[in-house]
Image: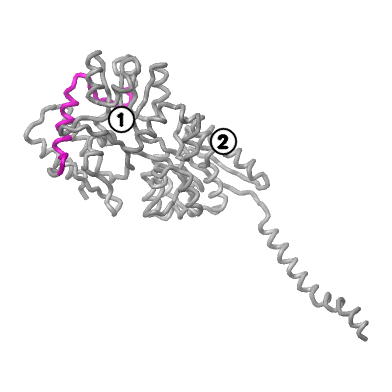
Amino acid sequence: MKRKICIFFPIILLAILLPGCQKKSQKLAEKEKSASPGTVNLVVWSAEEDKELLSQIISGFKAEYSGQAFNITYKPQSESSCTDVLMADLENGADVFTFADDQLNTLVAAGALEPVENAGLVKKSNIPESVLAASVNDTLYALPLTADNGYFLYYNKKYFSEKNIKSLDKILDIAARHDKKFSMEWTSGWYVYSFFGNTGLTVGLNDDGITNYCTWNSTKGDIKGIDVARSMIKIAKHAGFTSTDDAGFLKGVRNNTIIAGVNGIWNAVALEKAWGKNFGAAKLPSYTCAGKQIQMASFSGYKLVGVNAYSEQREWAVKLAEWISNEENQKLRFIMRGQGPSNINAAASKEVQASPAITALLGQSEFSCLQHLGGNFWEPVTAFTEDILSNNQPGKNLQEKLDKMTEGITAP
């Protein structure tokens, strides 16, 4: 009897378990069927100039995940106006998009971005300022992509030594001596910040994300607003100075009337072509203010990669965003587009370090801050500097002009 029990028990047990196993197998098959790789559809927005670069990056992504079928569509979209277009139809917007860091607060407030999942790794891999630019209240919402939207000094080595370029006074004197010019665009508050930035006088965005605070008219402290204004007037009157925009700067470089100037990475190729072996770039110089040498400051900007919180393929969109912004593809971006990497290893590569413009920008980064400002900043600063450029006289109403500018900047 025991022997029979031993013989028939496995058969009975199998009969009991088999229906359960079949049910589990059916469920597993159904689950695997539902998770089988169908085509993943993704839309990517990036600058029109990125078309060839993105084509290579997307091809690499598909090769990396060759077991998955993809339909990835690239559409050109200006990074400066990305947010406006996205907000018009967020749910049907791009799955992955590149944008300028000053749009981050708006995107987060609108619920277009969710916190980055691998925040620790991203923070460890990128320069601190780029991480800060991609964060709101210490929470990372986007992936850093570039660290090159800033400005620094370009100079012609035929006229300047490395020692000369450390002082704006020296640069202006040498330019005037050769009947040439040092150029800087003063009709843009973006560049004018250089003179106020390292003085203890402040400007920035309030917690409401709309209005600004500003102490550029301060009458207290070692350096007052009027001290900076007087220094600017002295510079404006100098025979070696001119204020001009990008087009005027390039024209002056090409016809040899401008031998030094403050500008950004976007003109590096044109300047290197014009100056050849005499092409030079460095961090901004110091200038004289209230009897002191003040290191000129700068605004910095970063390009970021965002993942639409409403993406129907969010998991794959995240993977693609990580791929676009990884170390190797930031190196590729530098090679193909000349854009400076935010990734620490990519920025330290031989290719990047061999670029005078990128090296200058990285050197200036120590004296730069994020350009997070409300819209009321720009026009009052332009009005103030245009007045200085046209009058060039330190009249007794200079403090009133500073007060008027500050009032405009901080207007609700």
Q: Total number of numbered labels?
A: 2
- Measured along the vertical axis of the image, is residue 13 above or below residue 171? below
| Disc 1: CA contacts within 10 A as few (<14), some (14-19) or many (>=20) | many
Dot 2 corresponds to which residue? 55
Residue closest to the eye, 124 or 11: 124
Q: Earlier in the sequence, mark 2 or mark 1?
A: 2
Q: Is residue 210 left or right of residue 335?
A: left
Q: Is residue 21 left or right of residue 63?
A: right
Q: Quadrant of the N terminus?
A: bottom right
Q: Is residue 406 left or right of residue 164?
A: left
Label number found at residue 143: none
Name the residue located 28 percent from the left edge and 36 percent from the top edge: 297
> Magenta includes 185?
no
Secondary-structure class at tag 2? helix
Label number found at residue 284: 1
Label 2 vs label 1, nearer the camera:
1
The span shown in magenta is: 221-249
Q: CA distance from mark 2 to mark 1?
A: 36 Å
Q: Locate residue 15: give its quadrant.
A: bottom right
Q: Is residue 190 visible?
A: yes
Q: Locate residue 8: give its quadrant.
A: bottom right
Q: Is residue 91 visible?
A: no
Secondary-structure class at tag 1? loop
